[in-house]
Amino acid sequence: MTKRDELVGANLEAAIELRESGRVEEARRMLLSLHAESPDDPRISLQCAWTHDMMGLEREALPFYTDAIGQGLEGEDLREALLGLGSTLRVLGDHAQAAEVLRRGADLYPDAREFGPFLAMALAGVGEWRRAVGLLLRDLAQTSADEGILHYRHALLEYADEFLEEESTAAGSASED
């Protein structure tokens, strides 16, 4: 690691600390400066995206998410970038693209339960209500510790499957037409 890489890493950590301590605008300015110096660093792009998102600047966050993903993020960072990008696209009204990104995330990270609710919201936005309800029912039944939900877990999973099967059957017959 070069001295420059060490300096960038230290400055990146300082910007994250500023954001986490509530000094978000200061963190944003520092991250934008770092991004100008190292525009191909996916870690910086991702932190820029998160900071803009946190400030309610979703439209400004969007290119940082796409840059970060395109710059080769992996593992946990890619997982979080896909969720952030999908959520941001949904907030901006691009439900179809959001669903595509969130499906990709759910496929790459099948154990990442957080994709389900965000995907369900995007699906609802494009009119895929049955699939959205099926995903939410399945996630609720599989993750709830509530005694009442646990009591009906088996039935809820069957209903979730019905919603998910009916949606895929309807999509299959629509594509055959």
Image (tube, rainbow, N blue to C red):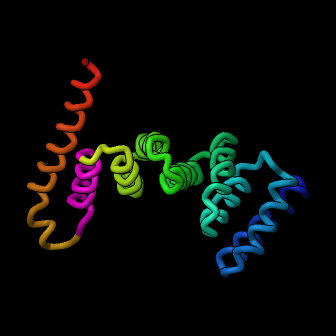
For residue 93, say whether it is visible.
Answer: yes
Residue 125 at what x, y percent from top left? 38, 49
**Residue 139 inside the magenta-drawn segment:** yes
Which residue occupies the extreme top position in the image? 176
Give the residues in magenta. 130-144
At a point 86% along the width and 62% down the height, the residue shown is: 7
Q: Is residue 68 left or right of residue 98?
A: right
Which residue occupies the extreme right position in the image? 3
**Residue 104 inside the magenta-drawn segment:** no
Residue 25 at what x, y percent from top left? 74, 74
Picture quadrant where residue 171 is located: top left
Up/down of 175 relative to 107, above or below: above
Q: Is residue 7 left or right of residue 175?
A: right
At a point 64% along the width and 63% down the height, the residue shown is: 57
Residue 2 at what x, y percent from top left? 88, 53
Q: How many marks?
A: 0
